[in-house]
Amino acid sequence: MRISATFLDEISHDIPHQNWGRREWDADFAHMKAIGIDTVVLIRCGYRDWLTYPSASLVNGAHAFEPPVDLVRMFLDLSEEHAMRFFFGLYDSGRYWVNREYRKEIEVNRRVIDEAWNAYGGSPAFSGWYLSQECSRNVDGIAELYAELGTECKSISGGLPVMISPYIDGPKALGQDDPRTSREGGVSVAMHEREWDSIFSTIRGSVDIVAFQDGHVGFHELPAFLHVNKRLADRHGLSCWTNCETFDRDMPIKFLPIKWEKLLLKLRAAANAGIRDAITFEFSHFMSPQSAYLQAGHLYNRYREYLESLTGA
Amino acid sequence: MRISATFLDEISHDIPHQNWGRREWDADFAHMKAIGIDTVVLIRCGYRDWLTYPSASLVNGAHAFEPPVDLVRMFLDLSEEHAMRFFFGLYDSGRYWVNREYRKEIEVNRRVIDEAWNAYGGSPAFSGWYLSQECSRNVDGIAELYAELGTECKSISGGLPVMISPYIDGPKALGQDDPRTSREGGVSVAMHEREWDSIFSTIRGSVDIVAFQDGHVGFHELPAFLHVNKRLADRHGLSCWTNCETFDRDMPIKFLPIKWEKLLLKLRAAANAGIRDAITFEFSHFMSPQSAYLQAGHLYNRYREYLESLTGA
Amino acid sequence: MRISATFLDEISHDIPHQNWGRREWDADFAHMKAIGIDTVVLIRCGYRDWLTYPSASLVNGAHAFEPPVDLVRMFLDLSEEHAMRFFFGLYDSGRYWVNREYRKEIEVNRRVIDEAWNAYGGSPAFSGWYLSQECSRNVDGIAELYAELGTECKSISGGLPVMISPYIDGPKALGQDDPRTSREGGVSVAMHEREWDSIFSTIRGSVDIVAFQDGHVGFHELPAFLHVNKRLADRHGLSCWTNCETFDRDMPIKFLPIKWEKLLLKLRAAANAGIRDAITFEFSHFMSPQSAYLQAGHLYNRYREYLESLTGA
């Protein structure tokens, strides 16, 4: 089991920014490539007022700030130089879909899809789309939002693949402001299966890849969820990846790099569930040799040793 | 718009200490100078039991601990070597003025002012004073505290300038223990203007420079407050600086360096309000190439590129 | 007063992992040795599901995870190479003893003691035991737990020394999820003395070293507690160390390295109480030149300067 993809955490909700320029990003793509990562997924092109590219529709229509750098262009160029695939993440208003005004979230993103494809669709590295609205439960309308946005992405781009990365509503699904690392309760495996069976039946054909986040449930409980995720995805013809998180949800500092043992355990659990592909959230803060968190560089080294052990075996 | 001053965060409330010795501080002053910072402002000479200099009055009278190093002397010497101006920050009891026993806060600081001027007033780098009691609203007695302490500082030192750095009572004005990054409500622009008009009318003549902290309101709301701050300061003959914070108040880790884009946006907003001078809180943790937070070094590089772009233009 | 011992924080509750391999640990032991540390104490051999060594009894009996590396073996080997003494920390179920099911906690640890001594007792570096159940108050049964486990450790190992490291139930004794850094109240010195007099009378003969954590009370209150700790230990024939914490409990980030001034003050307070030996929690995150927290390396340098000043004096 290898990690072949990573999110690019621009724009972030809750992870402090590293203030890298093009030189650092270039080096980071090289570090990714050296461990077999060939796909980068922009987690979102914008969040509320912050943008990764100069979007006329969002600056004018959603009073977002004009960004100082066109990160999408930079990431596409770097992807091309490093022979990586780039997936474009849609805009997360942080408002409409949280308040379940899905129609508005869809409308603002229709303009973004159009804009993005016109501006960047010509890049040979533009390889897919990511729907940035993260959910865990089958709340009314969320599946239709995925279906409609996914269809829009695919139709404008000649069928490029569309990815989502939901989370499991487990004990570690906590608000950003919550000082705890865990809560009582959480969704049961059966309820999770029922709800996602329903969601998948709605989004099949519009979404190609589903990569559940693997950090919201206990380590003993994870395998059961992974098996359900894989079975459901197979049933509905979706490709099932794991989003193997490289940050540690069990610590009071939210968030620093995960302990290697935990990462290894999650990768093996995904492999045991028959999953073949892993994306991580995310390389540059939590796994990169040049991360501001020096634990990340050591995680990188541990992961390299693991890769060597696979080859040796 | 350039940052020409920084606070020195000794003693800190809430930012972990870097444990630098004289060598590291010397290097930091050189890093500051290289980007045009010519003024350093000691945020406070003492907080509760912790001191930056061996104060007989505070060790004996306020049971503070005798510090292992005389940081004030070291900062003055380094300021002289690097041709910087040093402002001395008063003592923050953390008790009296929080409980609005302003008379006691004034008395303890009268002794500190006397002591500091006697010990350090001969240094050619001693260039001003900073009143360390931070407030946001016109609570009874706070303006008089500023006026009385400012007058005392000026009269003992032959009129050296006195600075304050209030905050705006905005949505991000939260207690140190609050796990949230934002709250509902916050002062309105009109109320802010009314209260500070009143405070300024009391402190004019006793305080020379007001540098409002720029991090407690949303980025879209900041310009209106900056304009009010400048207009009020002009009206009352105070010099209006911006305290352009270099740490990020929007993140769960309290606190790490700010995203360059946000810093740039705040600097431009201050320039648009007609403000000419910026101090930051603070260089050594959040902007220094040798900060323990490596994001700070990248922020330094982004800021240098910005300076070069100004020169080039 | 010198620090001659450190805990090894594997497995951690609340301190993010550094992901070191053998090379980094080897270097860290050398860094320790260079400042006079000759004893390393494994804080616990396992916590809940996470283990430092492949324990058949815990993997099979407590559904713990098989660890990827035998850290106990590695630490013993490194201890031997660096001429250090290694203390083995018992298993902390995180369940039984928290729920006061002491009998279960004892039973699971009887098997661990047996297992550990069989596997590692032959190492010349194996020099003692650490009872990992941390307590502060004389709750029913805790003294008996210490006595029974301590006796077991000593009897199987030919009387090797047994250490505990309790905490003082002071204002900074807060749950991991508590965003505050301090609370009202806390145990009085008199009550602390009464309760620990009782505990010591039960554990004497079974426990050899008591190293109270020094970070849960205010800096002005610490000396009184240190004197009580020393007097009580002397009365009951225990060796009294101080556990001089090298992380800062007063900061919102939980936890980063402590300010040197605070560490110095605590070391001197312990010396003044007649205490001769200090262990720290812990070197590798908070005091090591290769820590991910760069403040730690500066703390190391400040401590070295202090050692030099002792030698010079």
Image (spheres, coloured by chain):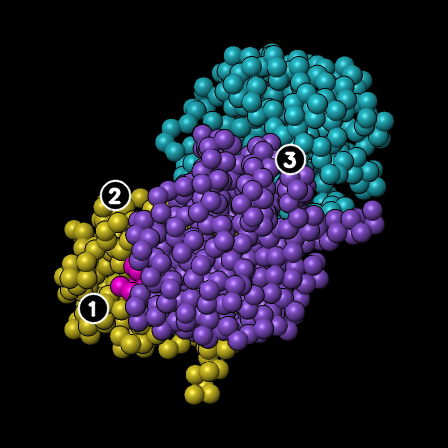
Chain colours: A yellow, B cyan, C purple
- The part of the image, by quadrant, that contains residue B8 is top right
Chain letter for mark 2, please.
A
Residue C290 in sight: no
**Residue at the image point whose x is 38% and y is 62% from the top:** C109
Query: Label 2: few (<14), some or many (≥20) within 10 Å?
Result: few
**Residue at the image point whose x is 43% and y is 88% from the top:** A313
Q: Which residue is mark 2?
A: A99
Residue A228's disc number: 1
Looking at the image, is C231 positioned above or below residue B232?
A: below
Q: Given the image, on which type of amino acid does mark 2 rest?
A: Asn
Horizontal side of residue A201 vs B201, given as left or right: left
**Residue at the image point whose x is 30% and y is 71% from the top:** C60
Q: Which residue is mark 3?
A: B11
**Residue at the image point whose x is 70% and y is 23% from the top:** B60
Q: Position of residue B71 (x, y in %)?
A: 74, 37
Mark 3 vs mark 1, foreground winner is: 3
Residue C177's disc number: none
Q: Are marks 1 and 2 in contact (CB under 8 Å)?
A: no
Q: Main secondary structure of the magenta part?
A: loop
* Magenta-span inclusion, residue B283: no
- The part of the image, by quadrant, that contains residue B218 is top left
Q: Secondary structure at mark 1?
A: helix
* Magenta-span inclusion, residue A220: yes
Q: Secondary structure at mark 2?
A: loop
Q: Position of residue A185 (x, y in %)?
A: 23, 51
Residue B192 in sight: yes
Horizontal side of residue B58 vs C88, given as left or right: right
Provide the residue span drawn in magenta: A212-221
- Mark 2–mark 3 Cα distance, whole angstroms, equals 43 Å
Query: Label 1: few (<14), some or many (≥20) within 10 Å?
Result: some
